[in-house]
Image (spheres, helix red, strand yellow):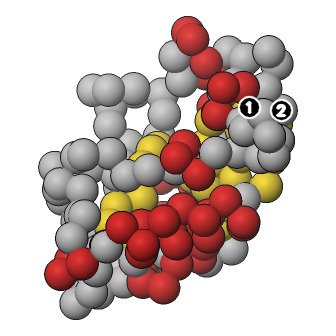
Amino acid sequence: MPLKNLHKAFANYPAIARLLRYKFLPSDFLPDEKLYRGYKKADISEESGMLEGNHFTFPKKGGISCDWSRFAKPVDVRKRRKDTKQDGCYSFTVENARYNGKASTCHDPNPKLNPKNYAHMEIRQLRPDDDPFHEPSKDCKRLEKAADGWSKSKRLAYREHISRCLSIEIETLV
């Protein structure tokens, strides 16, 4: 079987892919698959009772960490570190994360960082000319300039879009 066909076969058998530590491509994410992200009680606005938009901000380097629903369940966000046992979990779809071709979904199962979290993925920013299924480097710097397609107003619009589309999967315990 040619390697290209083998690649497509892995997408249909998540258990085999996990066992072999296969790294999926951005094009392997289905638009309606969910991405899970943990949150703490402090991330909820006291005024609105909604998740703060600043909770969903691109870091200076890399992308926004999430867990991919193909390999995870909402409760898995509580297994990341010792201090996350009481975290809540929200979700949004791959399609929401790719909003207007602004970002790419990148499978990032880092065995050195967390060998058990095969579901780990990052949402990484794209430049205007990037292919929607391009995988920016894990070491890419946060895009903040209008020339990169990420002016302050565009970053705000992206955060607001995610805030409108998210669903709370698990409430925080504290």
Q: Is residue 12 left or right of residue 18?
A: right
Residue 109 is drawn in which quadrant? top left
Where does label 1 land, which residue? Answer: 88
Three-letter amino acid code at the position of disc 1:
Gly
Secondary structure under tag 2 reads loop
Determine the CA span between mark 2 and mark 1. 5 Å
Q: Which mark is residue 17?
A: none
Camera-side residue of 45 and 55? 45
Quadrant occupied by the N terminus = bottom left
The answer to whether 163 is drawn above or below residue 6 in the figure is above
The answer to whether 122 is drawn above or below residue 39 in the figure is below
Camera-side residue of 115 and 7? 115
Residue 99 picture location, percent across and down: 52, 78
Quadrant occupied by the C terminus = top right
How packed mark 2 is, by other alpha carbons closer than 10 Å (few <14, some 14-19, many 20 or more), is some
Residue 80 is drawn in which quadrant? top right
Residue 113 is drawn in which quadrant? top left
Residue 74 picture location, percent across and down: 73, 40
At horizontal 27% and vertical 86% (from top left) the residue drawn is: 128
Camera-side residue of 159 and 171? 159
Residue 53 appears in the rendering: yes
Three-letter amino acid code at the position of disc 2:
Glu
At horizontal 57% and vertical 11% (from top left) the residue drawn is: 83
Where does label 2 land, which residue? Answer: 171
Camera-side residue of 138 and 153? 153
